[in-house]
Image: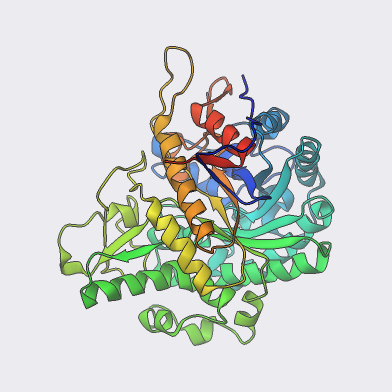
Amino acid sequence: MYPTPATAPASVGRLHFPPGFLWGAATAAYQIEGAVAEGGRTPSIWDTFSHTPGKVAGGDTGDIACDHYHRYRTDVTLMSHLGLQAYRFSLAWPRVQPGGRGPANAAGLDFYSRLVDELLDAGVQPVATLYHWDLPQELEDGGGWAARETAERFGEYAALAAEALGDRVALWTTLNEPWCSAFLGYGSGVHAPGRTDPALALRAAHHLNLGHGRATAALRATLPGHARIAVSLNLHHVRPLTADPADLDAARRIDAVANRVFTGPMLSGGYPADLRADTAHVVDWDTLVKPGDEAAIGAPLDLLGINYYTPALVSAPAAGPAEDRHAHGDSPHSPWPGSEHVRFHLPPGETTGMGWAIDPTGLYDLLMATSRAHPGLPLAITENGAAFPDVRSADGLFHDDDRIDYLHQHLAAVHRAIADGADVRGYFLWSLLDNFEWAYGYEKRFGAVHVDYTSQLRTPKASARWYARTIGSNSIPAR
């Protein structure tokens, strides 16, 4: 059932990664765990959203998902056979702290404690993400991320998690893709909680930033000194359609609300002036950002996680037909406050099953730009992968050569960036398992391992075997 990782010695004709380069895979709690009403867990915003008719394709929910809550030992054995060196998972906030307030839930923490022990016994480094979008519904009822209190509660939750697991988990990520939480959750409404107010989206972005700062402080105060703290951002590599000044300004605008709304206060001392100016008619930044907020958000990090799938190609509105679905999903509401007029275009070339352009040069350019902007800050690819319409062959296996080609191209881009000076320390494949793909339900499959959602049978695809050989040799074939 399981592929065996290659252990062949280094050979010529391959692109070798630096010694100690960390190879892993990633998942998220709501996408795989299931058991949404077991062990004291209370509803999250994704439970509510997925059970709202019309919000998720096929009416799918994460109620069972991959049943990882009951099958985690099987999944860890699978990781071991794949040769994974690290596993990036997320804690479900409403499982650890039901309702988002008060003491920790012992049963919920016990699940993650058992998972961590199982990983360590298998020689797989646990990498914990505190927040991958499953806000306790009670906190959303009180205003969610648009309310400042949620940031304070997040810091308290971080301390509870660190106290329970910090003796064994040495790498922590505060937030995963806060852009999606803020601008898809409160702007376009295609993600939970499904709100469509540009002012709330910007407020949510600030409070996610502040929550990151509060969590970082709590982790520093609780974890051993050797522990490392990171954040994972889905940084957009934004390209203008032409060199026309209007298109260049469109790219600047999207870069501000996609990237610098987070990297500004987290890494550069504060919110950029052009972002504030672009969105001054949407939100009063002077009222929203309290004295000391930006200093708290800017607490030093040990690692910056970058999630990358595809670049963004933008223009001013007069440039002709545009693929706005790429920017908005299926919502008529824009996730780009203050820059709703900017047009998004589908770059030429092949696309994944998500309709996203396959362009590894975007990853290379993003890594180099980030390295130049933040010298001395180590980087890691904390998500990268692709959905394709996987089909079982007559031999019973999944020969997903399109996914292998995608991974090869993007790992080659990472290798090139390292060779050109980017300090990239590791790579986490998205995703270990096929899973609940948010508003797409179970339509889209990103996994290196196929999951039959009826039987819960796990079947490694050809890409899993390819990735196992990559890990085993710390290299990919040269082309």
Question: What quarter of the picture does the C terminus occupy?
Answer: top left
Q: Tell me where residue 33 appears, x and y as whole percent.
A: 63, 37
- In this rendering, position of residue 342 left or right of residue 442: left
Give the answer, above or below, for where 272 lies relative to 195. Answer: below
Task: Determine if residue 63 is in view.
Answer: no
Q: Residue furthest front?
A: 12
Q: Which is more toward the observer, 77 or 372?
A: 372
Q: Tell me where residue 138 appears, x and y as whole percent.
A: 62, 57
> What is the quadrant of residue 107 in the picture?
top right
Q: Residue furthest top?
A: 394
Q: Which is more toward the observer, 221 or 60?
A: 221
Q: Residue at x 42, y 44 (%)?
A: 409
Give the answer, above or below, for where 301 lies relative to 284. Answer: above
- In this rendering, position of residue 306 left or right of residue 121: left
Task: Determine if residue 132 is in view.
Answer: yes
Q: Residue at x 46, y 41 (%)?
A: 478
Q: Residue at x 60, y 33 (%)?
A: 468
Count of numbered circles on the image: 0
Give the answer, above or below, for where 16 lies relative to 103. Answer: above
Question: What quarter of the picture does the N terminus occupy?
Answer: top right
Q: How is the image coloured?
A: rainbow
Q: Tell me where residue 236 appears, x and y as whole percent.
A: 42, 61
Q: Which is more toward the observer, 176 or 34?
A: 176
